[in-house]
Amino acid sequence: MMKIKKGSRILFDDVEVAESYTSRVKGLSGRKSIGHDGFLMVFPWEGKHGIWMPMMKFAIDIVYIDSCKRVVDIKKHARPMSLNPMTWKVFRPRKGSKYVLELPSGKSGPLKIGDMLSFDMPKPR
């Protein structure tokens, strides 16, 4: 778990981190809720990483963060996929990101594009 700050203010106190390929692919699928303040996916390189939401049970806000920890895009109230193909969507940022922060829908309010964030990655076990 980690904290995410904007300046000296802690915005998200209890963020789950997904660094492995498997944990990023599984993401929040099958869960009833995020269960923490947020879910941070860490990618090995910066790119326009797509987020899709199969087997999700709730909407989320998706915050894309570049390698300098600057917010580059925000998708609010992203809805999960259903059996209806009209809902099948991949969410991609306008600019490359290294980190993708998934938050409960409506919780990205304190963030805007261009914000600088700070967080320390947990040490490997």
Image (cartoon, grey):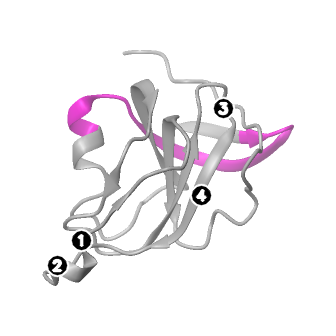
Three-letter amino acid code at the position of disc 4: Ile
Q: Earlier in the sequence, mark 3 or mark 4?
A: 3
Helix or strand or loop: what does disc 4 sit on? Answer: strand
In three-dimensional space, the C-alpha distance between marks 3 and 2, rounded to whole angstroms, equals 34 Å
Q: Which residue is mark 4?
A: 74
At horizontal 40% and vertical 15% (from top left) the residue drawn is 124
Identify whether 26 is placed above or below 59. Answer: above
Q: Earlier in the sequence, mark 3 or mark 2?
A: 3
Bin the neighbour count of mark 3 within 10 Å (Cα to Cα): few under 14, some 14-19, many 20 and up.
Answer: some
Would residue 88 be found to the left or right of residue 106 on screen?
Answer: left
Q: Residue furthest right?
A: 8
Bin the neighbour count of mark 1 within 10 Å (Cα to Cα): few under 14, some 14-19, many 20 and up.
Answer: some
Of badges 4 and 2, the one in the foreground is 2
Q: Earlier in the sequence, mark 4 or mark 2?
A: 4
Callout 4 touching callout 2 (CB < 8 Å): no
In three-dimensional space, the C-alpha distance between marks 3 and 4, rounded to whole angstroms, equals 14 Å
Of badges 3 and 2, the one in the foreground is 2
Q: Which residue is mark 1?
A: 88
Would residue 110 be found to the left or right of residue 125 on screen?
Answer: right
Query: What label does residue 51 carry, if any?
Result: none
In three-dimensional space, the C-alpha distance between marks 3 and 1, rounded to whole angstroms, equals 29 Å
Helix or strand or loop: what does disc 3 sit on? Answer: loop
Q: Which stretch appears magenta?
A: 5-23
Helix or strand or loop: what does disc 1 sit on? Answer: loop
Identify whether 118 is placed above or below 105. Answer: above
In three-dimensional space, the C-alpha distance between marks 4 and 2, rounded to whole angstroms, equals 24 Å
Residue 49, position as x, y percentages in the image? 39, 41
At horizontal 53% and vertical 72% (from top left) the residue drawn is 105
Query: What label does residue 85 carry, if any?
Result: 2
